[in-house]
Structure formats: structure tokens, C-alpha cells
Image (cartoon, rainbow, N blue to C red):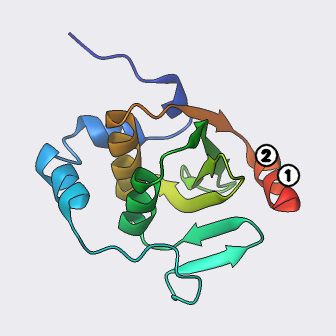
Amino acid sequence: MQKEKPKHNEFDNIWEIRESGYPTKEQIQEIINDTTYMGTDISAPEVKNIGKAVIYREVENFIKTVLRKRSIRLPVWKIVIPSLTTNSGAIYYIVTYDDGYNFVFRGTFGYWGTGPHESALIEAIFENYGLQFEVRDADYLLQFFEEV
């Protein structure tokens, strides 16, 4: 029986990447079990602080930070920004906590580079933990950065 593509993947190819077998259960477990954790050290080159937002450059650290927090405001915002010239684009994942702090990761979609696989990893792990996505467009991203 063919699975139906989730609504939050309507505008990207992340579901197709996941259906092709990535990430495997072993890859997901490896990330979850890895004890290396950078946290939210704002002086680290892997993160950038903007107001009440921490932008992660390393997908594993973003995932681990989100999973260690207890009071997440659902849904996880998934901001899809398509390219004007190719069948690809950016995906910003924004997780907000009850204290108003936000954690952000920029993934991509399309068919080259590691970005789509990072996005697939985020979605596979977050869905495994019961986190839900709501898709927004680029206007929401601008509004988000004006408010933090």
C-alpha cells in the first residue's frame, strides 16, 4: 500500500528522500545516543544568536537541543522558501519554547548537497517524538526575525 505524502511536505522533496530509505533507524538512533553535545554556547562558531533566537549550523546540535528541552510550543514552524530559478530552496525549522526562546535551523530541499538529507533527518526524528509541523512561507520568516 502506497503511503500518502504528508501535507507538510507538499512543497518539497523531503518525504521522497525519507521514502528512499534515509535516514535509517540506525542513523536516527546514532544521533539520539551520541553523547557529544554542544548546547547553546553563544560563543561557539556553530551557532549565531539574534535576539531570542539561536540559529544552528550543525543539524545534530539543533536536534539534540530540541530533544533536551521540555516545554516546546507546538507546532514546529517549517518555513519553505523556494528558489526562483531551480526546483530547490530553503527550509527554516523554528522551535519555540514556553520561555519565548527560539531555536532555528536552515535546511534545504531539492536534489543536490547535504541540505535535503539534513531536513529529512530533522523531520524523521521530530515526527518520531510526536512533534508536528506547520508550513509557512517567507513572509512568516521576516515577521519572526522582526519580533525576536
Could you give the CA–CA distance between mark 1 and mark 2, rounded to whole angstroms? 5 Å
Q: Which residue is mark 1?
A: 143
**Residue shown at 88% from the left, 60% from the top:** 146
For residue 39, the mark is none
111 w.r.t. 78: above or below: below
**Residue shown at 45% from the left, 24% from the top:** 6
Residue 6 visible within the image = yes
**Residue shown at 60% from the left, 69% from the top:** 55
Q: Using a 10 Å C-alpha cutoff, classify the residue at mark 1 as few (fewer than 14 neighbours), some (14 to 19) or many (20 or more).
A: few
132 w.r.t. 102: above or below: above
In which quadrant will I find the C terminus? bottom right
Q: Residue furthest left?
A: 26
Which residue type carries mark 1?
Gln
Q: How many marks?
A: 2
Nearer to the camera, 70 or 110 = 70
Which residue type carries mark 2?
Tyr
Locate residue 37 relative to residue 74 in the image: left or right.
left
Q: Position of residue 4 (x, y in %)?
A: 37, 16
For residue 140, the mark is 2
Residue 112 visible within the image = no
Q: Position of residue 69 (x, y in %)?
A: 47, 53
**Residue shown at 34% from the left, 73% from the top:** 37
In which quadrant will I find the N terminus? top left
Asked whether disc 1 touches disc 2, contact meaning CB atoms under 8 Å apart, the reply is yes
Nearer to the camera, 88 or 77 = 77
Mark 1 residue element: helix
Q: Position of residue 62 (x, y in %)?
A: 45, 63
Mark 2 residue element: helix
Locate residue 13 relative to residue 138 in the image: left or right.
left
Q: Quadrant of residue 129?
A: top left
Q: Quadrant of residue 86?
A: bottom right
